[in-house]
Image (cartoon, grey):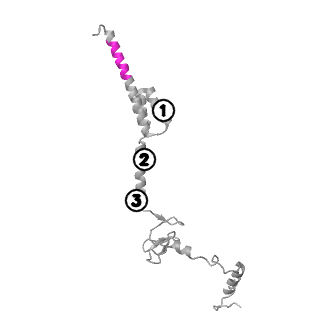
Amino acid sequence: MFDSWQGVVALVVALSIAYAVILLAGMAVWTFRDIRQRTHDGWAQAFAVGMVVLFNVLGLILYLVIRPSETLTESYERRLETEALLRDLPERRNCPRCDRVARDEFLLCPHCRTVLREPCLGCGRALELSWAACPYCGAQGPQAIRSTTVPSSLQQRPAGETAETSHESAQTAQPAPHAAGSPSTGATQRPS
């Protein structure tokens, strides 16, 4: 079939070139698919493919060394697992003043005596200060009680009464305070 050894050499060279081109194209396609699964950055994708095309097998080895360790899908699944684990962990409460750990049933911080929760008026369990109702018995919570009790200075006055007259009537109804430094006799003084 081949008349001379030059024909055999030409065939071997042609097959070697075809093999090298197919191998290079295959490595470039594999690198492109792999880098697309690992990053959305277009420059990183172009750099990885260019490195393989320019340096051939050495470029592929270099790409395998510097490529991101996990794919975008693996990264997303890891974040979901982390979020699920964090949701399942019991929430640890710290005192807002001294930042020490306080249990859920504590009403006061045992270290600095800061009010953390209030007892329910119905069942006595510890309720968060922001709750409007007790989730255990349905009684009004601390937030609802605070919003229903309006300070006397904010209550509506009868028609015709001004802020000055209500302030004067409040002063005459209260006993006069003791002067600073005066001895207290124990007897209450009555306003005149």
User: For the residue marked with disc 3, what is the amino acid?
Assistant: Asp
Please state which of residues 133 and 160 is positioned toward the viewer in this rendering: 160
At a point 37% along the width and 24% down the height, the residue shown is 22
Asked if marks 1 and 2 touch (Cβ < 8 Å), the reply is no
SS class, disc 2: helix
Q: Say which quadrant the C terminus sits in.
A: bottom right
Asked if marks 3 and 1 touch (Cβ < 8 Å), the reply is no
Pinpoint residue 105: horizontal percent, then vertical percent.
Answer: 44, 71
Magenta-highlighted residues: 8-20
Which of pointers 3 and 2 lies earlier in the amino acid sequence? 2
Answer few, some or many: residues within 10 Å of disc 1's Cα (few below 14, many 20 plus, some between 14 and 19): few
Asked if marks 3 and 2 touch (Cβ < 8 Å), the reply is no
Q: Which residue in the protein does label 1 denote?
A: 46
In the drawing, does residue 174 fall left or right of residue 66?
right
User: For the residue marked with disc 2, what is the amino acid?
Assistant: Tyr
Q: Which residue in the protein does label 2 denote?
A: 76
Pinpoint residue 83: horizontal percent, then vertical percent.
Answer: 43, 54
Q: Which residue in the protein does label 3 denote?
A: 88
Q: Any magenta on residue 136? A: no
Answer few, some or many: residues within 10 Å of disc 3's Cα (few below 14, many 20 plus, some between 14 and 19): few
Q: Say which quadrant the N terminus sits in.
A: top left
SS class, disc 1: helix
In the drawing, does residue 129 fall left or right of residue 176?
left
At a point 47% along the width and 29% down the height, the residue shown is 50
Please state which of residues 10 and 103 is positioned toward the viewer in this rendering: 10
Pinpoint residue 153: horizontal percent, then vertical percent.
Answer: 64, 77
Pinpoint residue 84: horizontal percent, then vertical percent.
Answer: 41, 55
Q: On the image, which quarter does residue 17 sit in?
A: top left
Answer few, some or many: residues within 10 Å of disc 2's Cα (few below 14, many 20 plus, some between 14 and 19): few
Q: Tell me if I can see residue 76 in this picture.
A: yes
Between the C-alphas of marks 3 and 1, the distance is: 41 Å
